[in-house]
Image (cartoon, rainbow, N blue to C red):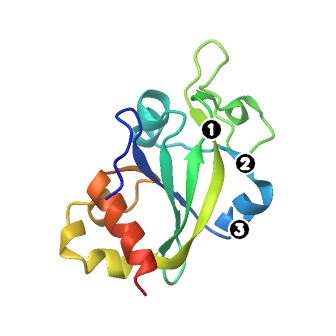
């Protein structure tokens, strides 16, 4: 079993592939993860997510939601500047430069999984019953335990 560094954490980031897919990330190589407008997800970005943390990239809002790839955090959290742009869909009039309300991080693609891991297969694995994805599927950024990470990575290569 892979032993992670004491300072590294695992996360699951959700994106609708019609909005931004893992293929988009592969093509872009790196991107800012903007537009988080949920306080719990914002708190994870602002307070917990660190450079080097690894991400399960999850395609949501499709007929077969699934984990498709692995990404890595490449920046510390910084204010989401789109919240200040009145012309942008993520504009928030309650956010300001002096008191930013929303934050983002940069991520880069690491690799596509050998095989996707569907939400159905995650829900059918009793060892993943406590996973946030199974119990709070609406949260767009979620912590993933070491054990959950290993199980999902193993599930992706065992087909």
Q: CA distance from mark 2 to mark 3?
A: 11 Å
Q: Could you say where residue 141 lies in the image, as x and y percent from the top left?
A: 45, 49
The reply to whether dot 2 and dot 1 touch (C-beta < 8 Å) is yes
Q: Which residue is mark 2?
A: 30
- Residue 123, image quadrant: bottom left
Residue at mark 2 to residue at mark 1: CA–CA distance: 8 Å
Q: Which residue is mark 3?
A: 23
**Would residue 38 be seen by someone viewing this image from the given angle?**
yes
Residue bearing mark 1: 74
The Cα–Cα distance between marks 3 and 1, rounded to whole angstroms, is: 18 Å
Q: Position of residue 78 (x, y in %)?
A: 62, 26
Q: Position of residue 95 (x, y in %)?
A: 61, 25
User: Is residue 17 or residue 113 the one in the foreground?
Assistant: 113
Check whether the beta carbons of the residues at disc 2 and disc 3 lie within 8 A of each other: no
Task: Name the residue furthest top.
Answer: 98
Dot 3: element: helix
Q: Is residue 76 left or right of residue 97?
A: left
Residue at 62%, 56% in the rendered image: 110
Crowd class of label 2 (few under 14; some 14 to 19; many from 20; radius 10 Å)? some
Q: In this rendering, would 152 be left or right of 77?
A: left
Residue 87 quadrant:
top right
Residue plotted at (59% across, 22% down): 100
Query: Can residue 118 be seen?
Result: no
Place of residue 29 in the rendered image (x, y in percent of width and height, measured from the top left)? 75, 53
Quarter of the image with the N terminus in it? bottom left
What SS does tag 2 mark? strand
């Amino acid at each position: 079993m892979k032993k992670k560094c004491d300072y590294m954490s695992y996360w699951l980031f959700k994106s609708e592939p019609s909005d931004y897919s893992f293929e988009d990330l592969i093509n872009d190589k790196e991107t800012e993860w903007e537009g988080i407008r949920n306080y719990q997800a914002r708190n994870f970005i602002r307070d917990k997510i660190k450079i080097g943390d690894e991400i399960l990239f999850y395609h949501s809002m499709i007929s077969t939601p699934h984990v498709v790839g692995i990404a890595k955090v490449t920046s510390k959290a910084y204010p989401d500047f789109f919240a200040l742009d009145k012309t942008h869909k993520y504009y928030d009039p309650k956010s300001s430069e002096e008191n930013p309300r929303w934050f983002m991080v940069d991520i880069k693609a690491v690799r596509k999984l050998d095989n996707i891991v569907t939400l159905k297969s995650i829900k059918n694995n009793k060892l993943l019953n406590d996973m946030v994805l199974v119990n709070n599927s609406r949260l767009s950024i979620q912590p993933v335990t070491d054990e959950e990470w290993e199980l999902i990575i193993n599930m992706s290569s065992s087909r």
